[in-house]
Image (spheres, rainbow, N blue to C red):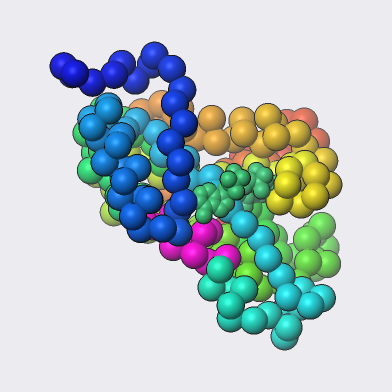
Amino acid sequence: MSGRRDSTSCARFVPLDVTDDESVTRTAEWIGAEYGVLDILVNNAGITRGDGGGRPSETTLGTLRAVYETNVFGVVAVTNAMLPLLRRAAAARIVNVSSEVGSIGSMTDPDGPLQMMCSVPYPSSKAALNMVTAMYAKELRDTPIKVNAANPGYCATDLNGRRGFRSPPQGAEVSVHLATLPEDGPTGTFWGHLWTADGDGGYGVLPW
Ligand SMILES: NC(=O)c1ccc[n+]([C@@H]2O[C@H](COP(=O)([O-])OP(=O)(O)OC[C@H]3O[C@@H](n4cnc5c(N)ncnc54)[C@H](OP(=O)(O)O)[C@@H]3O)[C@@H](O)[C@H]2O)c1
């Protein structure tokens, strides 16, 4: 495209606050002006917060709203802003970075490793994100765009005080996999590493 950059030339930094409508719009306009198209959208931004001991009965609506602003509403805002650009790509991919703690099946398994976790804001935001993922996949099923949710596994990042037992590059691999799916790859799935996964064990489609 004349006057536009070759999208393969280099990585470029664009400041984006997914909770700020103006920032989201500005970013979409910038990508449109610079590239005219978007091949891959990874909705990776995520936060976790808790009140008191973290129990549901101690949760404040302020905390709940803050977590949903980033983890759920931010994903919908960014995705809707980017969709016109994604539709211009030959085979766009959307990856929503979710978590196994958003899986109702995993969180309620009495014998599973997550049975000790009992909190509302972060887990319920990721459960909502899983449904958001499934609904976008449904709307876009007759297009080349694939929409999937990724579970990076428990990774050592700022989100958890670096306590995770997987490395950030290991966690990122799941998003890369879903962002580069071939034409016959899946859409509307929850994919990644189970909590206890070591190496390649427990890798694949996860329960919602
Ligand atoms: N670590 C794990 O074990 C784990 C497990 C499952 C899922 N996840 C998910 O993986 C994703 C990445 O998390 P992480 O583990 O890498 O945690 P992290 O180190 O805390 O990174 C979170 C990222 O989200 C960005 N962010 C937060 N609020 C934002 C906003 N309003 N607008 C734009 N960016 C925002 C942060 O940007 P700034 O640094 O600029 O604030 C940061 O880059 C999250 O969605 C998280 O829920 C993580």
Compared with residue 94, is residue 18 higher up or lower down, i.e. above or below? below
- Residue 201 found in image quarter: top right
- Residue 25 left/right relative to 194: left
As for residue 127 lying within the magenta part, the answer is no
The location of residue 72, given as percent across then percent down, is 48, 61
The residue located at (25%, 35%) in the rendering is 32
Q: Residue at x 77, y 41 (%)?
A: 156
* Residue 14 image-quadrant placement: top left
Does residue 7 appear in the picture of this structure?
Answer: yes
Please report the bounds of the magenta region as a residue range: 67-78
Q: Position of residue 111 (x, y in %)?
A: 83, 63
Taking depth in this image into account, of 24 and 43 the one nearest to the observer is: 24
* Residue 129 higher or lower than 25, as above or below: below
Q: Is residue 45 left or right of residue 75?
A: right
Looking at the rendered image, the quarter that the N terminus falls into is top left
Task: List x then y, in percent, for residue 168.
Answer: 70, 34
| x and y percentages locating residue 77 in the rendered image | 36, 56
